[in-house]
């Protein structure tokens, strides 16, 4: 839905468990039209489409894409964003670090992304700005320390996608960008590492390669890379890194790095008390979030000193009392400011929304709470109601940022 000016709000359909295009389509038909009638009855309603490699392949076969496009038009809905981060299944099976595979060293990641670009080429509204999100290049434990050859392969593969995007824009006027999503413990996980990737690898290596493929100078190709290789700013991920959102966004802007989308999602936040018994009760409550499906990276902040744990189960082995704060990569509902005695980074999201409203840093806000099926039982509510509450909270936060 349109918020103001060029700013658009969608929700990502990775919230819906399902595997295969038939199940994805069934979920969209079940939930999206009703949400549109409730939230956007007089105007078009946007979806952020999540597709695995299998689902993308199926959607491109047997006229399914034309059928889906007709369905969207008939319901007054549109797609400007596709989530191309998880290549495989995302619900109902252990995902953990497999969510990053195949990484950007592998041709399978390129092929999957090109399929998604072809789908968005067909679905993107006339004159629209579209984005395909993707994994943060690789998972650090797989490549650390990353060799120069790894970085060169990554740049070459990202360059293949950049070439396709440049040609699409020139030949058909369709503007689509790849949105790389930094995440804790990944090859690019924070602002300094993201900037370093652009400055040390993507631009100096990628610009001459792109210029050779599409013509023009290296300087011109550099600008094309900045146009088409953008960022997905996930509020949960940057909060877990204890980064100030305004400072991060200002740094990206200064470097010419664009934000293709801002994903609205809260992380769990826990402040451990000094009392040992209270700290133990808090750790016990927190242990209910240590599911076997997703990675829940943890960053501990003790008086400004950061310590990282690869998953919540690892961090819980060190849950002694003390004046320290944990932020946990667990996408909790936006409308909850906490689950006493646990908190959330809801205020971080509010600050990010205000930044997006006040300055033209992005054209897309995307609600991205996907952990409903692994929340502790007493925190779950009906899915349709939950999505609507996410929208209503976001709309209230956006409206209050004007005052």
Image (cartoon, rainbow, N blue to C red):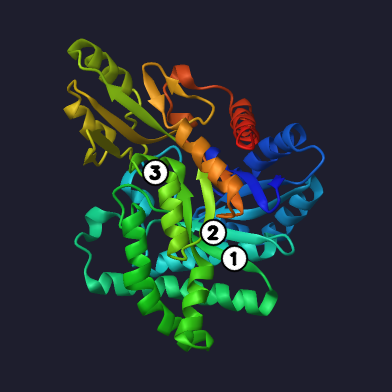
Local packing at callout 1 (Cα closer than 10 Å; few below 14, some 14-19, many 20+) is many
Residue tagged by mark 2? 132
Q: Quadrant of the C terminus?
A: top right
Upstream in sequence: badge 2 or badge 3: 2
Closer to the camera in the image, 328 or 76: 328
Q: Quadrant of the N terminus?
A: top right
- CA gap between label 1 and label 3 equals 28 Å
Residue tagged by mark 3? 244
Is 200 placed above or below 248 here? below
Residue at the top extreme, as displayed: 277
Is 331 placed above or below 340 here? below
Upstream in sequence: badge 1 or badge 3: 1
Of circles 1 and 3, the one toward us is 3
Q: Position of residue 145 (x, y in %)?
A: 19, 62
State the residue at coordinates (52%, 31%). Answer: 334
Closer to the camera in the image, 108 or 270: 270
Q: Position of residue 51 (x, y in %)?
A: 54, 52
- CA gap between label 1 and label 2 equals 8 Å
Q: Going by the image, does 144 lie left or right of 263?
A: left
Q: Quadrant of residue 143?
A: bottom left
Residue tagged by mark 1? 176
Q: Position of residue 120 (x, y in %)?
A: 63, 61
Q: Are the residues tagged 1 and 3 within 8 Å (C-beta)?
A: no
State the residue at coordinates (39%, 53%). Answer: 182
Q: Going by the image, does 73 lie left or right of 306?
A: right
């Amino acid at each position: 839905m349109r918020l103001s000016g060029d700013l658009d709000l969608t929700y990502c359909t990775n919230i819906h468990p399902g595997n295969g295009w038939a199940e994805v389509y069934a979920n969209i038909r079940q939930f999206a039209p009703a949400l549109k009638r409730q939230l956007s009855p007089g105007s078009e309603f946007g979806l952020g489409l999540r597709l695995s490699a299998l689902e993308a392949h199926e959607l491109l076969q047997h006229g399914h894409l034309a059928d889906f496009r007709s369905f969207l038009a008939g319901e007054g809905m549109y797609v400007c964003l596709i989530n191309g981060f998880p290549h495989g299944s995302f619900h109902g099976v252990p995902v953990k670090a497999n969510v990053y595979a195949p990484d950007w060293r592998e041709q399978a990641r390129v092929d999957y992304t090109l399929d998604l670009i072809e789908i968005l080429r067909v679905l993107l509204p006339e004159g629209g700005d579209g984005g395909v999100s993707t994994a943060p290049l690789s998972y650090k434990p797989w490549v650390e320390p990353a060799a120069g050859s790894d970085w060169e392969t990554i740049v070459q593969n990202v360059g293949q996608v950049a070439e396709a995007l440049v040609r699409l824009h020139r030949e058909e006027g369709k503007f689509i960008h790849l949105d790389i999503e930094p995440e804790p413990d990944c090859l690019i996980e924070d602002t300094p590492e993201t900037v370093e990737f652009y400055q040390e690898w993507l631009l100096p290596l990628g610009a001459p390669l792109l210029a050779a493929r599409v013509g023009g100078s290296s300087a011109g190709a550099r600008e094309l890379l900045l146009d088409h290789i953008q960022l997905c700013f996930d509020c949960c991920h940057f909060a877990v890194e204890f980064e100030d959102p305004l400072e991060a966004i200002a740094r990206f802007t200064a470097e010419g790095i664009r934000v293709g989308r801002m994903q609205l999602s809260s992380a769990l936040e826990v402040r451990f008390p000094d009392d040992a018994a209270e700290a133990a009760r808090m750790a016990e409550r927190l242990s209910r979030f240590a599911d076997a499906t997703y990675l829940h990276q943890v960053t501990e902040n003790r008086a400004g000193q950061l310590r990282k744990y690869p998953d919540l189960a690892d961090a819980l082995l060190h849950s002694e009392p003390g004046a320290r704060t944990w932020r946990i990569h667990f996408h909790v509902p936006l409308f909850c400011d906490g689950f006493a005695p646990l908190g959330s980074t809801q205020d971080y999201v509010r600050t990010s929304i205000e930044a997006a409203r006040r300055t033209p840093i992005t054209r897309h806000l995307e609600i991205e709470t996907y952990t409903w099926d692994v929340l502790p039982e007493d925190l779950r509510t009906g899915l349709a109601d939950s999505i609507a509450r996410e929208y209503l909270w976001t709309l209230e936060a956006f409206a209050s940022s004007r005052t």
